[in-house]
């Protein structure tokens, strides 16, 4: 699997309940939407009607929070069957979930928990991703999570672990720029080194979001504007990875839709500037996909 296997969608936002009516009634200028898979994995009713109407007008991707790919529990085949059925109905550009575990022993902890960064866990997670991809009959993307703790057993840096899993599982990467920044602050490593170590051909999508600064640590809350440091890290990522679809996440204290449009437009402008600077700096024509027409 390589990034060339996926379309470049441009600059999108997460589809959230407060904006359903606005999106359906006004068809605002937006390249694409990301939907939380579990919100629409239902037998019928209004949620599916809304998603069908949005899908008729915009590309979508499906982003999950319940795969628990790192757990020691068996994969949830019922969940995967529902996910596959949803994907067949709505034909997303891709499906993603988190490189984490969310529960064990049949109990859901309702959090995205980090893993020990070891070769053994690389093999465990990679095997499970391959099973999921075979079951869904399509590649998936795995997202780096923000973290607030580490394991004594870890032998790899987080970016080495992410890279090893993606390579062994032959899957894509959803690179959450804000999560890189949050974890780098919390664990005192270099966010720039992280970005520079990720394989270019594996990165298919970005997440951009805000966080809460608690002084001694940062929390990935998705309830603030994207900070300037994360924007700068995004520009660095664009210079390294080129044309990658970017998504604005905003899940609490959700503003008016116009604010999301403005934030997505800022991502577009930073992308154009970084791509232009890269092309001018190396004297070559960088690979630039045509942006979706609004």
Image (spheres, grey):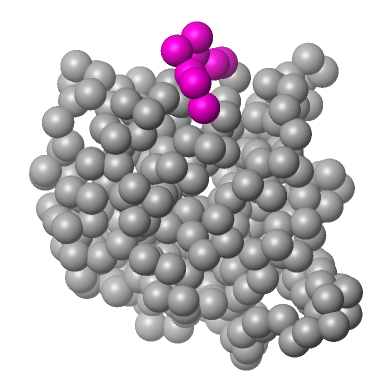
Of helix, strand and loop, which mostly describes the magenta segment? Answer: loop
> Residue at the spot x=25%, y=19% of the render?
104
Q: Viewer-proximal residue, 156 or 51?
A: 156
The answer to whether residue 43 of the structure is visible from this angle is: no
The answer to whether residue 243 of the structure is visible from this angle is: yes
Decide whether residue 150 is among the magenta residues. yes
> Residue at the spot x=48%, y=18% of the render?
154
Magenta stretch in the rendered image:
149-156
In percent of width and height, residue 171 lies at: 36, 56
Give the quadrant of residue 221. Answer: top right
Q: Which quadrant is the N terminus positioned in?
A: bottom left
In percent of width and height, residue 20 lies at: 49, 64
Q: Viewer-proximal residue, 254 or 206?
A: 206
Q: Is residue 264 left or right of residue 131?
A: right
User: Residue 96, relative to residue 238: is it above or below?
Assistant: above
Q: Viewer-proximal residue, 224 or 143?
A: 143
Decide whether residue 127 is among the magenta residues. no
User: Residue 103, relative to residue 19: is it above or below?
Assistant: above
Q: Viewer-proximal residue, 49 or 119?
A: 119
Q: Which quadrant is the C terminus positioned in?
A: bottom right
Give the quadrant of residue 96. Answer: bottom left
Q: Is residue 275 left or right of residue 148?
A: right
> Residue at the spot x=49%, y=45% of the render?
163
> Residue at the spot x=69%, y=50% of the render?
196
In percent of width and height, residue 175 lies at: 57, 51
What is the count of numbered marks?
0
């Amino acid at each position: 699997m390589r990034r060339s296997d996926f379309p470049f969608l441009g600059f999108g936002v997460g589809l959230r309940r407060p904006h359903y009516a606005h999106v359906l009634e006004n068809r605002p200028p937006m390249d694409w939407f990301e939907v939380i898979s579990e919100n629409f994995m239902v037998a019928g009713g209004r949620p599916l009607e809304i998603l069908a109407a949005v899908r008729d007008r915009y590309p979508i991707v499906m982003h999950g929070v319940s795969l628990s790919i790192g757990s020691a529990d068996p994969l949830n085949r019922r969940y995967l069957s529902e996910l596959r059925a949803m994907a067949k109905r709505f034909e997303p550009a891709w499906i993603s979930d988190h490189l984490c575990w969310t529960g064990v022993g049949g109990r859901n902890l309702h959090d995205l928990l980090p893993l020990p960064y070891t070769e053994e866990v690389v093999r465990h997670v990679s095997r499970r991703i391959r099973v999921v991809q075979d079951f869904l009959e399509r590649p998936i993307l795995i997202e780096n999570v923000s973290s607030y703790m580490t394991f004594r057993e870890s032998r790899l840096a987080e970016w080495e672990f992410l890279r090893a899993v993606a390579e062994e599982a032959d899957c894509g990467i959803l690179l959450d720029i804000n999560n890189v920044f949050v974890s780098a602050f919390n664990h005192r490593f270099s966010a720039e080194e992280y970005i520079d170590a990720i394989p270019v051909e594996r990165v298919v999508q970005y997440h951009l979001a805000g966080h809460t600064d608690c002084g001694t640590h940062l929390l990935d809350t998705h309830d603030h504007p994207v900070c300037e440091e994360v924007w700068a890290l995004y520009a660095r990522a664009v210079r390294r990875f080129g044309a990658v679809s970017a998504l604005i996440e905003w899940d609490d204290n959700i503003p008016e839709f116009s604010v999301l449009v403005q934030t997505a437009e800022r991502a577009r402008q930073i992308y154009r500037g970084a791509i232009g600077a890269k092309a001018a700096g190396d004297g070559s024509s960088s690979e630039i996909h045509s942006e979706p027409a609004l």
